[in-house]
Amino acid sequence: MLLSGSTVKELSGGEKATTNNRMELTAALRALEVLKQPCQVELYTDSEYVKRGITEWLKGWKARGWQRKGGELKNVDLWQALDLALARHTVSWHWVRGHAGNVYNERVDTLARGAVPSRAAPPRW
């Protein structure tokens, strides 16, 4: 969900064979990619994996050639794409507790549940 002044843009999508972490990363990536010009962004997520990945771990992964201290970095394709998307914008990251009554977090959860693909539906974004 993107908010800009009085404008709201809702995006949703899904993939059949995926994980929650991949979908959380993809959501942040798609939100940044849809912006047509460099922006100041307040990005809220209920995913500690995404927030900590960006604010705490990303610099180290890049310094180690996109590796974790313990070896392989999962979802490296999405982390690299998100890193590129972040270069265009000034982003402040915020974590919110999921399912705790935050109106925007609850709306995003509804969008996500509605985007779970059926067996016949192709991936969409």
Image: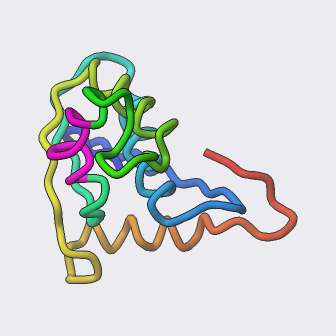
User: Vertically, is 107 above or below 2?
Assistant: below
Question: Residue at 37% across / 45% down in the picture?
Answer: 28
Image check: 72 left or right of 13? left
Q: Nearer the viewer, residue 72 or 99?
A: 72
The image quarter in which residue 96 lies: bottom left
Residue 89: x percent and y percent? 23, 23
Who's the residue at 17% across and 34% down the image? Answer: 91
Instruction: Indicate left or right for 104 with 107 as reference.
Output: left
Furthest toward the bottom, the residue is 100
Whether the magenta-drawn stretch holds residue 32 is answered as no
Quadrant housing residue 94: bottom left
- Main SS of the magenta segment? helix
Q: How is the image coloured?
A: rainbow
Residue 90 place in picture, x, y as percent: 16, 26
Give the residue at x 68% y 48%: 124
Farthest residue in the front direction?
A: 70
**Magenta stretch, residue numbers:** 51-60
Query: Residue 108 appears at what percent x and percent y?
Result: 39, 65
Quadrant holding the C terminus: top right
Q: Is residue 58 magenta?
A: yes
**Relative image position of residue 71 (x, y in whole percent):** 41, 47
